[in-house]
Amino acid sequence: MDFLYPILFWLLAALIGVSAVAMVVTQNIVRAATWLLFTLAGVAGIFFLLSADFVGATQLLVYVGGTLVLVVFGVMLTAQGPFINLKIAAGEWAIAAVVGIGFFSLLAFTLINAKFDFPVPEQSQVATTAPLAAGAADGDPLIGDKGTGHRSLAASVVLGEALLGFEKTAPEAAVTGPRDVMAVPAPLPGMPPPSSRQARLVPVLKRQKMAYLLPFEIVSVHLLVVLIGAAYLARSKRRRGGA
Amino acid sequence: MDAVGLTPFLLLGALLFVCGTLCMATKRNAIGILMGVELVLNGATVNFVAFAYFNPVFEIEGQIFALFVIVLAAAEAAVALAIVLNFYNNHSTVDVDTAEELKG
């Protein structure tokens, strides 16, 4: 099923690119909101493709389900007659096109010529076959592919432990299949012997250098402040001058 | 599984970023500008998650920062929409070209 990965990526990339460009080009604010919906949903698909399940689900819930609904309500509350289609001059379109193409060319030139040297973990030589086999047998080849140990756990579990500052560092976890915390899978060809499977059921929790609990708390307080502030700003007042 | 590689994901993020900046620059509707900001933040998030996938050192950090970006974008959208609605209540327009003075 490996061939699905590039196909899915290019389909999603085409969806995102077309939607984003159409959102810039369209003059109608309601259509722009609709194109934004397709763009955000496509980005969520990209996150699922990058095996960031929790981030993709959050994108769908918060962005598509929350922020976009907010934006659509803003459009509905303010879209009256002349404000639906606010046009700009043709000369401004030309300037925008030149600036946009030049900017994207600069970024693309830089990115294509950039060299990224990432450190390769040592277990990756060992783990190239077993997680792939386990993942393929599980019907989900996109999870246990990199063999770095974290990848084989459920993504939200790893994220939650990272928030608390713990890291699961069972060395046996590098050669196991996905979802090994939830249930003991049936012995498959290509799986490690049962002794190591016994070992990885008792995961070793190690203190990380970085914990993200304080930023998480700050973000939650920030959300509360934003909620109060937005409600205060948008409270209904007597309008001046009718309309 | 790495048949696509890192660069196409980064190019996708760059495309989203450029479209967002153009959207901010060309839209005259205040809510259109807000949508452009959302597009820019999504481009940044795609970059975070792509680096989290391809660089094993940052695989936790990238996803966590992507989550923070998403949450802060929601907060920013709420406040900006409140400001836009307030502006609309006071001026009866959402055209930012008429918003030279934001005194209300």
Image (cartoon, coloured by chain):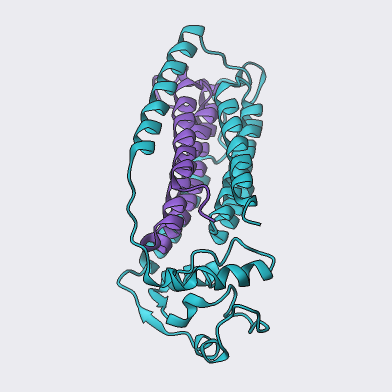
Chain colours: A cyan, B purple
Quadrant where the N terminus of chain A sits is bottom right
Q: Is residue A113 visible?
A: yes
Residue A103, percent from left and from top: 39, 26
Residue B7, percent from left and from top: 44, 43
* Relative to A81, residue A64 above or below: below
Q: Residue furthest left?
A: A209
* A173 with respect to A63 (left or right): left
Total numbered labels = 0
Residue A226, percent from left and from top: 46, 50
Which quadrant of the view contains residue A169?
bottom left
* Relative to B36, residue A99 above or below: above
Q: Which residue is painted at 61% across and 53% down in the image?
A: A61
Quadrant where the C terminus of chain A sits is top right
Q: Decide which of A44, A144 is in the foreground and name it.
A: A144
Residue A129, percent from left and from top: 54, 70
Q: Which residue is painted at 54% across and 77% down in the image?
A: A176
* Relative to B5, residue B26 above or below: above
Q: Is residue A170 visible?
A: no
* Relative to A60, residue A99 above or below: above
* A225 with respect to A37 (left or right): left
Q: Decide which of A72, A133 is in the foreground and name it.
A: A133
Q: Which residue is painted at 55% across and 83% down in the image?
A: A192
Q: Which residue is painted at 53% across and 34% down in the image?
A: B35
Which quadrant of the view contains residue A26?
top right
